[in-house]
Amino acid sequence: MRLIGSDSSYKGEPGIIYSSEETAELAAHLKFELVVKFTHGLPNLNFLRIHIVKLGLKGNVTVRRLNFKHVLIRLSNEEDFSRIWLRSEWTFDSFHMRVFKWTPNFDPQIESPIALVWIRLPALPVHLFEKNALFTLAIKLENH
């Protein structure tokens, strides 16, 4: 087993520091994780699981409570991840929830800085609607 992290201390207490590369490595398998924030209380997790299953997702899903307002949803594929994340807000019965992409810097006290942006490209040629062409365009727009 390979150990990662570097020994450190803070105010005399032992600690470990992880580099950006190590953090990315540790988080790589979490790329299809979503954080769900409930605005008016958290429903029973079984209730939430039942409603998520009713969405007809293609892969596996696990639901885990983080705190009194947040739930972590782990999806097993990009299609299911996109389907839930792109809608960004859901209501199951009277439980309203907002969906955020999980990041290693997730802090339940701070709203996520990652937001969905819709861009209209009315004159985009049909052959550029391929996923790889759209991702190239998105990366270019992201940097501006």
Image (cartoon, rainbow, N blue to C red):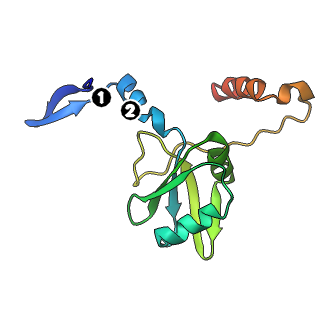
Viewer-proximal residue among 29 and 59? 59
Viewer-proximal residue among 68 and 141? 68
At which x and y percent is residue 112?
Answer: 50, 47
Amino acid type shown at disc 1: Tyr
Amino acid type shown at disc 2: Leu
For the point 68% across and 54% down, which residue is it?
87
Q: Which residue in the rendered view is the most extreme toward the left?
A: 12
Vertical placement of residue 76 versus 133, above or below: below
Give the secondary structure at mark 2: helix
For the point 38% across and 32% down, which residue is it?
26
Q: How far apart are marks 1 and 2 (CA)?
A: 10 Å
Residue 26 image label: 2
Q: Are marks 1 and 2 in contact (CB under 8 Å)?
A: yes
Left or right of residue 114, residue 87 in this image:
right
At which x and y percent is residue 29?
Answer: 47, 36
Vertical placement of residue 144 versus 47, above or below: above
Q: Mark 1 points at which residue?
A: 18
For the point 67% across and 60% down, which residue is it?
55
Q: Residues within 10 Å of mark 1 (few under 14, many from 20)?
A: some
At which x and y percent is residue 93?
Answer: 63, 76
